[in-house]
Amino acid sequence: MARFRVDSIDHVELFVPDRRAAAEWYSRALGLEICSDFEFWADDAGGPLMIATADGRTKLALFTGTPCDSQSDSAGFRRVAFRVDGDGFVAFVQSAGERGLRDADGGALSALKVVDHQSALSVYFRDPWGHALEVTTYDAASARSAL
């Protein structure tokens, strides 16, 4: 019998008050775009608006609803981390003030604190609805030298 293994995470589901406004924010902040092949799902008020990376391998399913209090009611959900190459990490960090990013208290971020994990670099922030997010690179040496 063949051993079962998943290939990757297909999507993460998030509740947001307005799916289109959230899609616009995620496009501005992270470059995610609406998946036109699945946009009809959002015609149903209970269906998701799917957004994805350019290759479509990483998706968020935006559902209309009230986001959980990410500090206490997350039911095990902690954060969604997005992987980028070193150049992408540097570009993201350097343009943080233009992306509408928020800190844990909801305050606007003009700069991101880079956390050095030795073999990786990460930055942490929140979307306007309180979801914890991360951008990380394992191309730490080149990103570190460019920051």
Image (cartoon, grey):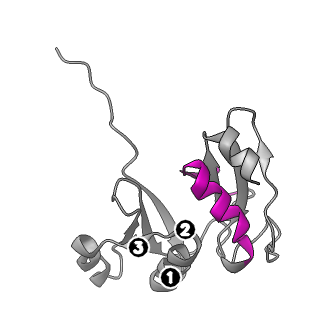
Q: Residue furthest top?
A: 1
Q: Secondary structure at mark 3?
A: strand
- Which image quadrant: the C terminus? bottom right
Spatial distance from mark 3 to mark 1, Cα to Cα? 8 Å
Please give the residue where the numbered disc 2 appears in the rendered image.
Answer: 30
Q: Secondary structure at mark 2?
A: helix
Mark 1 neighbour class, 10 Å CA radius: few under 14, some 14 to 19, many 20 or more: some
Image quadrant in which you'd find residue 99 = bottom right
Say which amino acid is labelled 1.
Answer: Glu
Three-letter code for the amino acid on which mark 3 is drawn: Glu
**Magenta residue check for 146:** no
**As displayed, is residue 89 above or below residue 17?**
above
**Residue 62: x %, y % from top left:** 44, 71
Quarter of the image for residue 140 reads top right
Q: Which residue is mark 3?
A: 33
Amino acid type, residue under disc 2 in the picture: Leu
Chain part drawn in magenta: 73-97
Identify the residue at horizontal 74%, vertical 45% (top origin).
144
Residue topped by disc 1: 24
7 and 75: which is toward the camera: 7
Residue 108, image x, y percentages:
79, 77
